[in-house]
Amino acid sequence: MKPESPINTIPPVIIVLALAIIGIEAVLQLADLAIIGGPRGVGWRIDAVQRFGFAGAVLDQIMVNKDYSFGLLSRFVTYPFINTGLTQMAFCAALTLALGKFTAEFYGGVKILVLYFVTAIAGALVFGFVAPNNYPLIGGFAPVYGLIGAYTYALWLNLKAMGENQLKAFRLIAVLLGLQLFFGLIFDTGYGWVAELSAFVVGFALSLLLAPGGWSAFLRRMRTRS
């Protein structure tokens, strides 16, 4: 009997997310090299950022001018698929596959798909209130941090079941935030961390409802603990 391929264990919705991230970057890479789109293809990435990326100006347009057009509202969920280049895309796709596989096994593929986009929206909302109007938000790190929030809660539950210190569940986010602070002191890392931290918090909170048993199970655990 042949061993099951690791790829076969990844839920289809997670594979689709990763393929979307990879596929869009592949097109933009070919355009950057003028292999497709000709000389104008070099500007496709900038055009993609302007058309599908998020910024505080988008939130202003929606809230101040009451512009609820599809083009503006869709930016809340399209920006994660536009990356700055190969490096960002590789990290986002790899983390989406790894975290998506683990969290989908615990919560379910459809629930993780919902969490991915809800945390992307939440990250963009907070980013829009904090960052300068024309500062762009692109790349899939915000929803990846949302997946980290879901992963943290699942690990928190597992540690409780094993009778271990549940604070260990927060080691990953603590390390990531430490790295963010370190690089922020050395380089200008921008405002992306605002969306990422917000997405983590929302991802963790949303996991209370998405976990097996939902909110009622969470309340039972809290009563047992008290």
Image: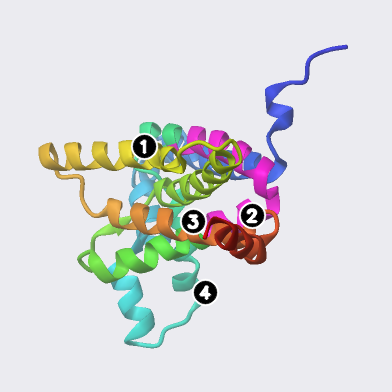
Q: Is residue 180 visible?
A: yes
Location of residue 42 with respect to 94 vertically, above or below:
below
Q: Tell me the residue that label 2 is attached to.
A: 211
- Which quarter of the figure has residue 10? top right
Q: Of the residues shown, which amino acid type is indicated by label 3?
A: Gly
Alpha carbon separation for disc pair 3 and 1: 26 Å
- Please rate how many residues cluster around mark 4, counting C-alpha atoms within 10 Å: few if below 14, some from 14 to 19, many from 20: few
Q: Of the residues shown, which amino acid type is indicated by label 1?
A: Gly
Q: Of the residues shown, which amino acid type is indicated by label 4?
A: Phe
- Please rate how many residues cluster around mark 3, counting C-alpha atoms within 10 Å: few if below 14, some from 14 to 19, many from 20: many
Residue at 61% across / 63% down in the picture? 209
Element carrying mark 1? loop
Residue at 62% across / 37% down in the picture? 101
Alpha carbon separation for disc pair 1 and 2: 34 Å
Mark 3 or 1, closer to the camera: 3
Residue extending farthest right: 1
Q: Tell me the residue that label 1 is attached to.
A: 85
Element carrying mark 4? helix
Residue 109: percent from the left, percent from the top?
A: 69, 48
Write the start and end of the magenta stretch as one range.
92-117
Q: Of the residues shown, which amino acid type is indicated by label 2?
A: Ala
Q: Tell me the residue that label 4 is attached to.
A: 70
Residue nearer the viewer, 76 or 222: 222
Residue 131: percent from the left, percent from the top?
A: 23, 64
- Say whether disc 1 or disc 2 marks the residue closer to the N-terminus: 1
Q: Is residue 32 visible?
A: no
Element carrying mark 2? loop
Element carrying mark 3? helix
Mark 1 or 2, closer to the camera: 2
Residue nearer the viewer, 120 or 87: 120
Q: Tell me the residue that label 3 is attached to.
A: 203
Location of residue 114 with respect to 45 vertically, above or below:
below
